[in-house]
Amino acid sequence: MRAVVQRVSGARVTVEGREVGAIGPGLLALIGVGHDDRESDARWIAGKLAGLRVFEDASGKMNRSVLDVGGAVLVVSQFTLLGDCRKGRRPSFVAAAPPAHASPLVTLVADDLESRGVPVSRGEFGAHMTVQLTNDGPVTLVIDSP
């Protein structure tokens, strides 16, 4: 499982002009699921997101988590994170899991975050989404499950 995580001052996702999710300060987590990913990967990613120390403390050091700062996470599925661009000019998405496998795992990431006390907003799996964000820092990280 792969997550591209951005520290944001705000983010929102719309589908056909309708807002389906939005947060203020926190993390935007774009989630890609591979064929071999399991529930343990989803729970590991959720734990990493909840505890990731990317928010500044009083000394200006990245020492605080989204839980510490009272932030939220916007979880958005994105199969293109598993795209392979090494050959040719068109990405190959053979590493991305099919929707029947991926959708429950993306949902589990969001549900697990909520169970840890993190406010969560969600995109709409499989929809053509428009994501707007204000990256704070900018801070952007790529996280792969073990």
Image (spheres, rainbow, N blue to C red):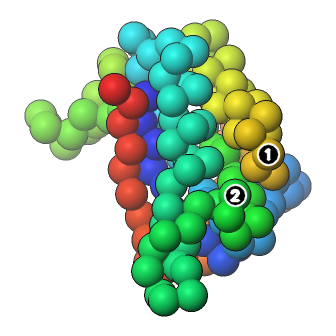
Quadrant in the rendering for residue 128: top right
Q: Is residue 59 above or below residue 87?
A: below
Residue under circle 1?
Answer: 117
* Residue occupying the far front of the picture: 59
Residue type at numbered disc 1:
Gly
Lateral position of residue 20 relative to residue 6, left or right = right
How far apart marks 2 and 1 lie (CA) works out to 7 Å
Quadrant in the rendering for residue 71: bottom right
* Disc ID at residue 67: 2
- The answer to whether one can see residue 23 in this image is yes
Q: Where residue 39 appears, x then y in whole percent?
A: 57, 15
**Is residue 146 or residue 105 the one in the foreground?**
146
Quadrant housing the N terminus: top left
Q: Mark 1: which secondary structure?
A: loop
Q: Is residue 54 above or below residue 114?
A: below
Marks 2 & 1, CB-CB < 8 Å contact: yes
**Is residue 146 or residue 86 the one in the foreground?**
146
Q: Where residue 116 appears, x then y in whole percent?
A: 74, 39
Q: Is residue 27 above or below residue 121?
A: below
Residue sitting at x 68%, y 25%: 108
Q: Where residue 106 appears, x then y in whole percent?
A: 63, 29
Residue sitting at x 41%, y 12%: 35
Dot 1, crowdedness within 10 Å: few (<14), some or many (≥20)? few
- Specify which label sits upstream in the sequence, 2 or 1: 2
Residue type at numbered disc 2:
Leu
Q: Where residue 72 appears, x then y in whole percent?
A: 74, 59
Quadrant housing the C terminus: top left
